[in-house]
Image (tube, rainbow, N blue to C red):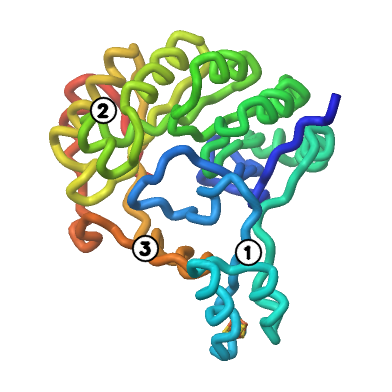
Amino acid sequence: MDELKGLIFSIEEFAVYDGPGIRTSVFFKGCPLRCNWCHNPEGLEMRAQIVRSPNGCLGCGRCDAIAKKHGGEYTQEAADACPRHLLRPSGVWYGADELCAKLLKNADLLRAGGGGVTFSGGECLMQADFLTEVAKKLHGKLHLAIQTSGYAPADKLRGLLPYLDLVMFDLKLLDAAQFRKYIGGDLSVVLRSFRIAAESGVELLPRTPLIPGVTDTPENLNAVAETIASAGLHKAELLAYNKMAGSKYKLIGKTYAPMFDESKAGVPDLTPFKERGIEVRIL
Ligand code: SF4
């Protein structure tokens, strides 16, 4: 049988915001959702892409002229045309053993720093079979976490959970119509995954990105707090709006188009969490 392979667009070492301790973060390519505020657009497509670095650019426009012929997307032809070699492929295929060997190289350091490995994306569950294979091989050797939107088939999630130590779960927007508008997709899939994760006994940490006027509204935060409390959980994290969210779009020839007013980012009212005895951290 052919070896399972996974498409990864970045591996970041010594990460400190992607779970407990010092961690290696592995970013999987591909996401079934399209959050309007996504700050990792190079992770959305489940295929290798060409990404342009702005540092050292001469402004000669050769890459953009070629990209124009391809709907604005940078191609290998555009990469070859750049006199400064500023266009590089994003997305590398790894075999499970190859990725595990790379992650285990720093195992002692990660354990000493109270950390481990976090699988993120894109949406890491979009490559659930490969991820499960990797997690099986690393289980018990490193603390393993995922960052997920929960947008995945139930059986894929159930198959992975026994090999994880922590699930950081995005509860972003809990109104079905708003979810469809700003994120794309069916909210019930997320809620089903949240129930499965909560019932699994694996440590579950709900996280909500604070998007001005969209997810940070009293109604949404109240719904998030209620969902967390109903699952018997007592901790949550709120992620402050990333003002650099749009900065990577030009790297892939796209434009950031938020459907909300970025300048309205404020301090959220934590009352719904406090009322339910939920300890909240704002990151
Ligand atoms: S071809 Fe290279 S140097 Fe010229 S505009 Fe594009 S990135 Fe900049």
Q: Which residue corresponds to mark 2?
A: 224
205, 43: nearer the viewer: 43
Q: Is 23 located above or below residue 153 in the figure?
A: below
Q: Which residue corresponds to mark 3?
A: 256
Q: Quadrant of ligand 1?
A: bottom right
Q: Which residue corresponds to mark 1?
A: 50
Query: Could you tell which of marks 1 and 2 lies nearer the N-terminus?
Result: 1
Three-letter amino acid code at the position of disc 1: Ile
In this rendering, the label closer to the viewer, 2 or 3: 3
* Point 27% across, 48% down: residue: 211
Three-letter amino acid code at the position of disc 2: Val
- x and y, in percent, of residue 105 in the image: 82, 41
Q: Quadrant of the N terminus?
A: top right
Residue placed farthest to the front in the image? 69
* Point 62% across, 49% down: residue: 47
Q: Is mark 3 within 8 Å of ligand 1?
A: no
Query: Could you tell which of marks 3 and 1 lies nearer the N-terminus?
Result: 1
Q: Quadrant of residue 184?
A: top left
Cα distance in 3D space between marks 2 and 3: 27 Å
Three-letter amino acid code at the position of disc 3: Tyr
How many discs mark residues in the rendered view?
3
